[in-house]
Image: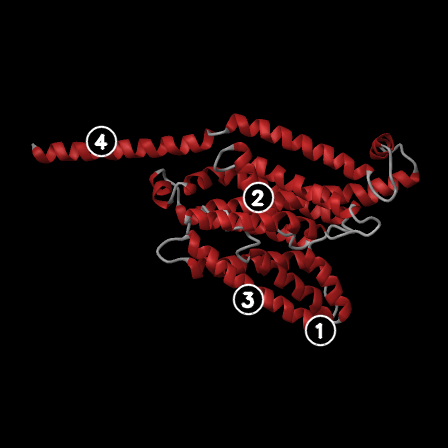
C-alpha cells in the first residue's frame, strides 16, 4: 500500500513539474507580446523615416517628390540614376545587413544566455573574415584569377568552421556561457592575428581593398548585393521563425527543454547553422560591421521587456545600420566614412558599460 502511494505521488509530482515547465514556456512565448507589437511598429516607422531621409540626403540633394517620382519611373535621368543606382540599393543593403546581423546575434546570445556571446565578440565574424580575406588576397599571392563571388561562400564556411571549433572547445558536459565567451574571445584573437598576417603578405592594392572591407562599409553596394541578401534572408528568416519555439525552450535550460520534448543538441545545431549563415552572408556583403549583432538584441529586449524578441531585434539592427550609414555619408561630407566606424563608436561604450555592470553585480556566466 505504501509503495503504491509513493508511486502515485511520484507520478503526480512529475505531471505537475511538466505542467509547470509547459506553463513557463508558454509564458516566455507570450510575455511582452503586446508591447513587442507597439515597439515593432515604432521601430518600423523609424526605419521608414530614416530610409526616406537617406534617399533625399547626399551630395546631390533631392526633394522627396523627385525621389518618389524616380521610384515610380517618372523622374529625370539624374534623379533616376542617383536614387535607382546609388542610394536605393545602398539603403536596402543597410536594412538587410542590419536584419541579418541582429538575428544572428539574438540566436547566439539566447543560446548562451549571455549578452557577451555575440558573433562579433566570440569569433564567428573573425572566422568569416579570415576566409573572406584569404579569398580577396589569394588571387595575387597565387598568381591566379579568383572569382570574387567566392567571398560569400568562403565567409559562410569560415564562420561555420569557427563556430564548430568554439563549440567543441567550450563543451564540457554541457555548454557554459562563461566558458563559451572566453574560448570565443581567444579564438577571435588568434583569427585576427591570421588576418593581419594575410594582409602583410598581400599586394598593396589587395591589402587596401581588404582593409576597407574589414572596417565594414556599404560604399558602392548595389543591386547584386541586395539580391544576395534578399535570397539568403528569404530562406533563413522563415527557418529561424520556425525554430523560435525551440529557442525559447532552450533559454530555460537544457533539462527544461528536454522536459517539453525538445531535442536539445539537434535544435541547438540547427539554430547555430542558421545564425552563422545570417552573420556570414552579411559579413560577405558589407564586411564585419562592428557591434550590430552585439547591440541589437539587448536593446530590443530592454524596449520590449521580454527575453526573446526576434522581430524587434531585427528592426533595431536595420535602424542602427541605416542611421549609422546616414551619419557616415553626411557627417564629414564630401568624405564618406565606413559604416563600421560609426557602429563601433556606438557599440564600444555599450560593451564597456556591460562589462562594468557585469563586474559590479559579480556575474560570471
Q: Nearer the viewer, residue 60 or 161?
A: 60
- The residue singled out by tag 3 in the image is 190
Residue topped by disc 1:
141
Say left or right for 65 vs 92.
right
For marks 4 and 3, the one nearer the N-term is 4
Residue pictured at 68% horizontal, 30% vertical: 45
Of the numbered discs 2 and 4, the one sitting upstream in the chain is: 4
Q: Nearer the viewer, mark 2 or mark 4?
A: 2
Q: Report, in whole angstroms, how far the alpha carbon at label 1 lies from the one at label 4.
A: 69 Å
Disc 2 to disc 4, C-alpha distance: 40 Å
Residue 282 screen position, x and y as percent? 65, 50
Q: Which residue is mark 2?
A: 103
Q: Nearer the viewer, residue 302 or 150?
A: 302
> Which residue is found at the position 46% from the left and 37% from the top?
245
Q: Is residue 282 above or below residue 183?
A: above
User: Residue 239, percent across and down?
Assistant: 54, 41
Q: Which x, y percent locates residue 77?
A: 92, 40
Q: Mark 4 Cα within 10 Å, few/some/many (few <14, many 20+)?
A: few
Q: Secondary structure at mark 2?
A: helix
Residue 338 in sight here: yes
Amino acid at each position: 500500500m505504501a509503495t503504491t502511494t509513493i508511486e502515485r505521488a511520484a507520478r503526480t509530482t512529475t505531471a505537475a513539474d511538466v505542467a509547470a515547465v509547459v506553463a513557463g514556456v508558454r509564458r516566455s512565448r507570450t510575455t511582452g507580446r503586446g508591447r513587442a507589437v507597439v515597439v515593432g511598429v515604432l521601430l518600423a516607422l523609424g526605419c521608414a523615416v530614416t530610409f526616406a531621409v537617406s534617399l533625399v540626403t547626399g551630395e546631390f540633394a533631392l526633394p522627396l517628390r523627385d525621389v518618389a517620382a524616380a521610384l515610380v519611373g517618372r523622374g529625370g535621368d539624374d534623379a533616376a540614376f542617383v536614387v535607382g543606382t546609388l542610394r536605393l540599393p545602398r539603403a536596402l543593403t543597410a536594412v538587410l545587413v542590419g536584419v541579418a546581423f541582429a538575428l544572428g546575434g539574438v540566436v547566439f546570445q539566447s543560446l548562451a544566455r549571455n549578452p557577451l556571446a555575440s558573433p562579433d565578440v566570440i569569433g564567428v565574424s573573425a572566422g568569416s573574415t579570415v576566409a573572406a580575406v584569404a579569398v580577396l588576397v589569394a588571387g595575387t599571392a597565387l598568381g591566379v584569377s579568383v572569382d570574387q563571388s567566392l567571398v560569400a561562400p568562403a565567409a559562410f564556411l569560415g564562420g561555420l568552421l569557427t563556430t564548430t571549433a568554439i563549440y567543441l572547445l567550450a563543451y564540457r558536459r554541457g555548454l557554459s556561457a562563461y566558458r563559451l565567451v572566453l574560448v570565443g574571445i581567444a579564438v577571435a584573437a588568434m583569427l585576427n592575428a591570421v588576418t593581419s598576417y594575410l594582409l602583410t603578405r598581400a599586394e598593396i592594392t589587395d591589402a587596401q581593398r581588404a582593409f576597407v572591407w574589414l572596417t565594414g562599409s556599404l560604399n558602392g553596394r548595389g543591386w547584386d548585393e541586395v539580391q544576395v541578401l534578399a535570397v539568403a534572408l528569404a530562406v533563413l528568416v522563415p527557418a529561424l521563425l520556425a525554430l523560435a519555439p525551440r529557442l525559447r525552450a532552450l533559454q530555460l535550460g537544457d533539462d527544461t527543454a528536454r522536459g517539453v520534448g525538445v531535442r536539445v543538441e539537434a535544435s541547438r545545431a540547427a539554430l547555430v547553422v542558421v545564425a552563422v549563415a545570417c552573420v556570414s552572408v552579411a559579413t560577405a556583403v558589407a564586411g564585419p560591421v562592428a557591434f550590430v549583432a552585439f547591440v541589437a538584441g539587448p536593446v530590443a529586449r530592454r524596449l520590449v521587456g521580454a527575453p526573446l524578441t526576434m522581430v524587434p531585434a531585427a528592426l533595431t539592427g536595420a535602424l542602427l545600420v541605416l542611421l549609422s550609414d546616414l551619419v557616415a555619408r553626411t557627417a564629414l561630407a564630401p568624405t564618406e566614412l565606413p559604416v563600421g566606424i560609426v557602429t563601433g563608436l556606438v557599440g564600444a561604450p555599450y560593451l564597456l558599460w556591460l562589462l562594468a555592470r557585469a563586474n559590479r553585480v559579480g556575474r560570471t556566466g
